[in-house]
Amino acid sequence: MHIVAGKEWTKLLVLFWTVVMAAERLANIPQVDITPDGVFKYVLIRVRSSEKGDDSSIDIVRGYAWANYHADIYERVATELEKGGGVDCECLGGGRIKHDSQAKKLHVYGYSMGFGRANHSITTEKLKIRYPSYEVTWADEGY
């Protein structure tokens, strides 16, 4: 039996709280944030804990009508998330979303010239959770 004391205990305690705080930070990031209506570009982003010993991550969907390029969305979101520390971002791909709030429909399609095609099935599953009363579909066709 090994008894942990002194510096070892402090290191373990710091590591534990670092992992807890990183997990809490990931849990507080909304998984979906998109423009309320219209057709717009979106990106699928993997947000990972950057803390040593913590390999937790989440995938998030961000889509906005203001973006001329998929990179505009990724750069703004990644900069905002990473400035708080404790996380790193990676763009997994992009596409477009047609959001018809009146009809309660979301359609995911297309690809990003810069980042490639996102896995639309992951995106649609996240959209279904965020918009449970919507019809959510996807296709690989279109740009």
Image: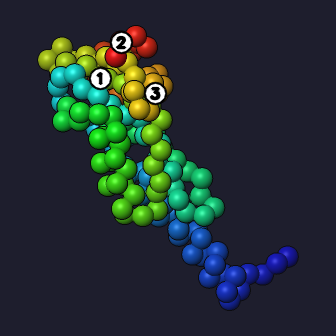
State which mark lies toward you, 3 or 1: 3
Q: Amino acid at mark 2?
A: Gly
Q: Which disc number belongs to residue 116? A: 3
Residue 23 seen in the figure: no
What sort of colour scheme is used for the picture? rainbow
Looking at the rendered image, the quarter that the C terminus falls into is top left
Residue at the extreme right of the image, as rendered: 1
Q: Position of residue 120 (x, y in %)?
A: 44, 22
**Residue pictured at 29% horizontal, 28% vertical:** 41
Q: Which residue is mark 2?
A: 142
Looking at the rendered image, the quarter that the N terminus falls into is bottom right
Q: Which disc number belongs to residue 43? A: none
Q: Residues within 10 Å of mark 2 (few under 14, many from 20)?
A: few
Q: Secondary structure at mark 2?
A: loop
Q: How far apart are the alpha carbons under marks 1 and 2? A: 11 Å
Q: Taking 100 as reference, is 22 left or right?
A: right
Which of 38/18 is in front? Answer: 38
Q: Secondary structure at mark 3?
A: loop
Which of 23/123 is in front? Answer: 123
95 lies above or below 43: above
